Each structure stands twice: as structure tokens, then as C-alpha cells.
Amino acid sequence: MELGKIERLLDRYDEGETSIAEEKLLREYFLSEDVPEHLRSYQLMFRFSASQAEEKLENKPKVVSKRNWYSWTSIAAILIVALGIFFYNDSSRMLNDNGLGTISDEELALQKTKETLHMVAQIMNEGKSDLVYLKEFNNTKNKIIQID
């Protein structure tokens, strides 16, 4: 086979545009012994691919079937539910209606309500203090937009 045709086929091979028949021609050419020195790297590549094609996989990898995995996960889920039911301590049955946090003294109830609302107001004000940064960001953004 002429060298110019081989080089054109190699260019097309590098671009991924060769057909299977053309690749077979290249493989046959490079498996022969009379290859020019500047094409020796292609000879190594085609010889390696030929040797890999002949090699057989002796130890097949062990594949866990999805069916087997599904059965084990369902068994584990059943065990978790069973243990949860067995060890579940229903403390709501032990509570009686008298001790549910009701305060009978009106002054004490008013004081506790004020403390709770004061705590909520502090938490809300902490979130509000962070909005100062957002306002500064908006001012800077407006300055940039006005420059353009």
C-alpha cells in the first residue's frame, strides 16, 4: 500500500472520520514489519489494540443483582420498624392534663408572656441589624450603575 494513502487515512483516523473497513486496512498495514520510522508510534498503538482484542477476561467481576440488593434493604427496613415499635416509649400516655404548662396565676402568666415576647423581639432585631449591609450594597450598586 502506498505511503501517501496511509498518511491520508491516518489523518482521517485522527479526526475520527474513517470507516471500519479503512481502520481494518490501517490495522493490517501496521501489523506488518515494514513500517517507516516516522509512523512507528502508530504501529505500537495498533499492535497494542490487536493484543488487547485477543486477550480474554478470565475473572469475571462479581455483579450484585438489584433484586438481591432490594431484598436486603427491605429486610433492613422491616427490622428498623420492628425495633422502633418495640423500643418506642409513648411518654404522651404518661402525661396527665393537669401539668401541661398552664399557669393559673394571672400576674405570673403576664410576666412569662412579656419575657417570651421580649425574647422574640430580640431575635427579630438581630435579623434586622444585618439589613444594614444590604442597604450599603444597594447604595454601592446604584453608584456603579450611575457611572456607566
Image (cartoon, rainbow, N blue to C red):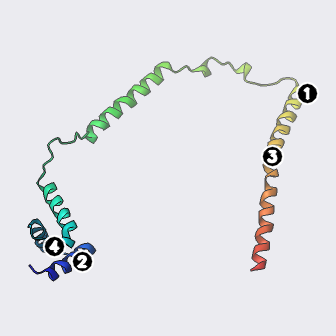
Q: Which mark is residue 11?
A: 2
Name the one closer to the observer, 66 or 38: 38
Residue at 66% x, 19% y is 95
* Of labels 1 and 2, the one closer to you: 2
Name the one closer to the observer, 16 or 51: 51
**Quarter of the image containing the C terminus?**
bottom right
Picture layout, residue 55 above or below residue 46: above
Residue 84 lies, in percent from the top left, at 47, 24
Q: Which mark is residue 16?
A: none
Give the crowd class for mark 2: few <14, some 14-19, many >=20 residues within 10 Å. Answer: few
The answer to whether the residues at label 4 and label 3 have Cβ atoms under 8 Å apart is no
Residue type at mark 1 is: Glu
Residue type at mark 3 is: Glu
Residue at 55% x, 19% y is 89
Q: Which residue position is annotated with label 1?
A: 107
* Real-space Cα separation, disc 1 to disc 4, in angstroms: 104 Å
Q: Which residue position is annotated with label 3?
A: 126
Dot 1 or dot 4: first in sequence order is: 4
* Of labels 4 and 2, the one closer to you: 4
